[in-house]
Image (cartoon, rainbow, N blue to C red):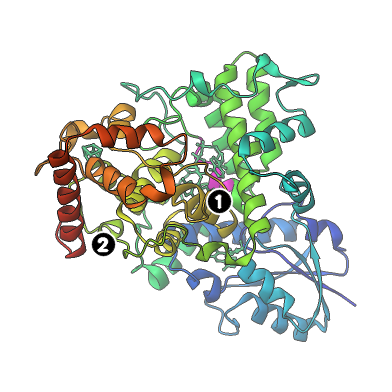
Amino acid sequence: MSRLVLVLGDQLSDGLSALREADRASDVVVMAEVMAEATYVAHHPKKIALILAAMRKFARHLEAEGWQVCYTRLDDPANAGSIPGELLRRAEETRATAVIATEPGEWRLIRALEELPLTLHLLEDDRFLASHGDFESWARGRKALRMEYFYREMRRRTGLLMAGDAPLGGQWNFDHDNRKPAPDAVTTRPLHFAPDAVVNEVLDLVETRFGASFGRLRPFALATDRAQARQALAHFLRHALPHFGDYQDAMLDGHRTLYHAVISPYLNIGLLDPLEVCRAAEAEHASGAAPINAVEGFIRQILGWREYVRGIYFLEGEGYTARNHLNHQRPLPDLYWGAGTDMRCVSKAVQQTEEDAYAHHIQRLMVTGNFALLAGVDPAEVHDWYLRVYLDAFEWVEAPNVIGMSQFADGGIIASKPYVSSGNYIDRMSDHCRHCAYRVKDKTGPKACPFNLLYWDFLIRHRARFEGNPRMAQMYRTWDRMDDSRRATVLQDAAAFLGRMDRGARV
Ligand code: FAD
Ligand code: DLZ
Ligand code: SF4
């Protein structure tokens, strides 16, 4: 009797464990475009289009490889509307009683599959380099789960950038060579892929169904199959990787991607494989085309951070997304939904997010994330925003980055201290402040940069919690050295700013 083989919209990989386990002569692949997945949050329309177009192309590819694929389109009148519903419908059609599935990247869907009245063979997602077991053994007995030590273990295990037992170049981490301020000019931009017939059909469908959601659908220039994703990777390796390390943390008013790879959506939906990407970057160093600080910095993001955050998501379990260690309760301000703001750095990051469904790491962490944390926004609302607006947002990777790294809502599992900064940091790493209505040098007064005001407001609000942290003690000493009237003015100005924002005024 045939079995059903589930392939989800972020499982578009030939080597998927469910496909490896199945028999192409007798089993039936089930792929379904369903409203439940398109609406569990109101995703950016570009993200929905990327996934549907890539699913359609992957289904064709599987058929060409000899698989029998039952593919359900979103507008099929028989569509059951959800992944479990579609599996039940296909089980009835084919008389299958068993489902082979690779573990989904979200607890919500794992639980939904477990509740099906069918025999479920749930397989590990071994497109990741660390299994749940690997991560649990690494984490067991450790007081703190710092990414750096996990990363070293992954270097040793994979042999990436290793010279025998030692790290290549004599160091595990070349970050002190990185983090240069914004360059005057950037010499590359990501490749654009003109929409073909499959993509155009999906764009029309998405426009009709999801056109009202936050985010611009067109222009759409993303890769939607493996061959294109490989081209995007090759373009990055050749033109951007050599500068990746130097400008990893920089931001520019007039350039949205700098030397970043812009491959996270392709990695996360399965068009690229993380080990393949790391090996390709390693080869660029071996051939002399890219320096060690760039290649090590890049590999650390994928081999280290990407694997580590997934490990944390599954280790911490289902309640993780509801954590609110700092008890922040402010609703997410409308400026995150494009209502407009005079803060140039925030306005640029939000505009770019609305248009491209992409912002690079420092924009997410030190601009939109930093502002939400300083302002005391409810982390559940921040989590919802990030899950909705980015092409690469799937809960296993988005939640640890937002709840943990960015909002400190997990109480310090991921970050040893909150990622907060005043306007100084943004001024050093970008040219936004030159174009801003606020003045980054002003610490108080009508033109004072809001990041300056809210930075102190945050530290003072949470003094009892953070003043004992050795990495933050210096900031409290600086505050204590200020005279009383200056301290009072900072806090009054911060409160006035938050009051204006809460009343819906443009800030
Ligand atoms: P590059 O800077 O070129 O880095 C290369 C690759 O490294 C990325 O493609 C990505 O696969 C990986 N990577 C880098 N940093 C991280 C990280 N912190 N966690 C996991 N992988 C990483 N990444 C997502 O894939 N999905 C998300 O939903 C997501 N949400 C984020 C939310 C916040 C608040 C923050 C601070 C970071 C988030 N990240 C997320 C991580 C990171 O910002 C993106 O992976 C990166 O910006 C993707 O762009 P890129 O491909 O140009 O990355
Ligand atoms: C994100 C997404 C969207 C928008 N649509 C679909 C879909 O129609 N069918 C599908 O199989 N998967 C979709 N996905 C991806 C799933 O939401 C994803 O597999 C889960 O969130 C687990 O990571
Ligand atoms: Fe952002 Fe402040 Fe600089 Fe304006 S002055 S761009 S708000 S950091």
Image quarter of the N terminus = bottom right
Q: In this view, does 310 lie to the left or right of 328?
A: right
User: Which residue is label 2 attached to?
Assistant: 334
| Quadrant in which ligand 2 is drawn | bottom right
Which region of the structure is painted magenta? 261-266
Q: Residue at 70% of width from left, 84% of height from top?
A: 89
- Kindly identify the amino acid type of the residue bearing the numbered disc 2: Asp
Q: Is disc 1's CB within 8 Å of ligand 2? A: no
Local packing at callout 2 (Cα closer than 10 Å; few below 14, some 14-19, many 20+) is some
Residue at the extreme left: 446
Query: Crowdedness of circle 1 by 10 Å Cα count: few (<14), some, many (20+)?
Result: many
Residue on which disc 1 sits? 224
Where 151 falls versus 127 (above or below)?
Answer: above
> In this orientation, which residue lies closer to the viewer: 270 or 157?
157
Measure how far apart labels 1 and 2 are at the Cα level. Answer: 32 Å
Residue 467 or residue 189, whichever sits in front? 467
In front: 345, or 61?
Answer: 345
Amino acid at pointer 1 = Thr
Instruction: State the image coordinates of residue 308 (x, y, percent, origin top left).
Output: 64, 45
Marks counted in the figure total 2
